[in-house]
Amino acid sequence: MPDSGLKAIIKEKVAINNRNWGIFAAIFQIVDKLAGFSRYPVVGPVLKKILRFDHPEKNYTQGVVISLNKSLSAGKACENVVLPVMLVEKAIRESSYRAIMHKCICRDGGRKCKDYPADFGCIFIGEGSRVTEERGISRSVTVDEALDHVRKGARYGLVCQCIWVEAEEFVWGIDSDRMHHFLEICFCCPCCCVALKNYRKVDKDIQDRFRSVGWKARAVKECSACGVCETRCPKQAIRIEDNLVRVSEGCIGCGLCAAACPENAMDLVQISPMKQNIHEYFFGFYPEV
């Protein structure tokens, strides 16, 4: 059953559409600045409750970080290896509905992104995503168009995040009973993405909701330990110690270090078997898209 009563009215009034887009783009920048307060007493719990991060057994906001880089170590060694980007492509091929956002709400807000195009938006998949087209902020696309969008994101050097965010029920205006028929495929830049910019600031319980699909960064022998990877890592999982690059278990395999390395000395290696479908990485529920 669709939402009714007060909940439906709230969604109709506050959800993003093509008229209030600019307001919400500015609000996203405020959320960006508030992220670090999640660690503070009183303010932190309130923020987590508003964003539905407060109850891990009932609120399942989470995401999977996927490198779009096809020159991964296992990929060089074995042509038959399943690369992370293939999980995204498979999810798109099997999806019942696909829509591409007209703009990226992170890149289009605040200072406007100077390095990556603001009009390169997320892909939404699943029947719950239809509302974004109805509200004039996305367009429905074919499987081939969506796959081409993913490949374009790889050429831009963006990081892919497949995310399901509970609070976005109100952001996009999705009916409650259609939320499990919804998944967001984001193409994130390190300079504007609210998630990537704030991994280091938020509590560990929020950080742990976003995980790798089984790949990890590694420095090759030619590395001079210049430190670029350390500064670029969104999770502070890289440290330069004794002139060597140390990568901790906190690495989410985003590939930003490899993309930024001036010596091409960082790579991603597979450390655990990948699952068959992107949906299997989510816990507490199974997105049916």
Image: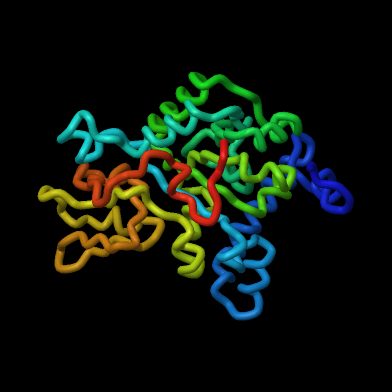
The extreme right residue here reads 5
**Looking at the image, residue 12 lies above or below residue 53:** above
In terms of depth relative to the viewer, which is nearer, 55 or 50? 55
The extreme front residue here reads 1
Q: Is residue 62 left or right of residue 258?
A: right
In terms of depth relative to the viewer, which is nearer, 266 or 164? 164
Q: Which residue appears at 70% of the width and 29% of the height? A: 133
Figure quadrant of residue 124: top right
Q: Is residue 224 left or right of residue 249?
A: left
Position of residue 174 measured from the top left corner of the image (x, y, whole percent): 72, 43
Give the colour scheme of this rendering.
rainbow
Q: Is any atom of residue 118 visible in this view?
A: no
Total labels: the figure holds 0
Q: Is any atom of residue 111 visible in this view?
A: yes
Q: Which residue appears at 28% of the width and 63% of the height? A: 248
Figure quadrant of residue 77: top left
Position of residue 93 measured from the top left corner of the image (x, y, whole percent): 47, 26
**Looking at the image, residue 201 lies above or below residue 74:** below
Question: Which of the image's four quarters has the C terminus?
Answer: top right
Q: Is residue 110 left or right of residue 136?
A: left
Position of residue 192 measured from the top left corner of the image (x, y, whole percent): 52, 48
Q: Which residue appears at 73% of the width and 49% of the height? A: 170
Q: Which residue appears at 60% of the width and 61% of the height? A: 33
Question: Which of the image's four quarters has the N terminus?
Answer: top right
The extreme bottom residue here reads 41
Position of residue 38 measured from the top left corner of the image (x, y, whole percent): 57, 70
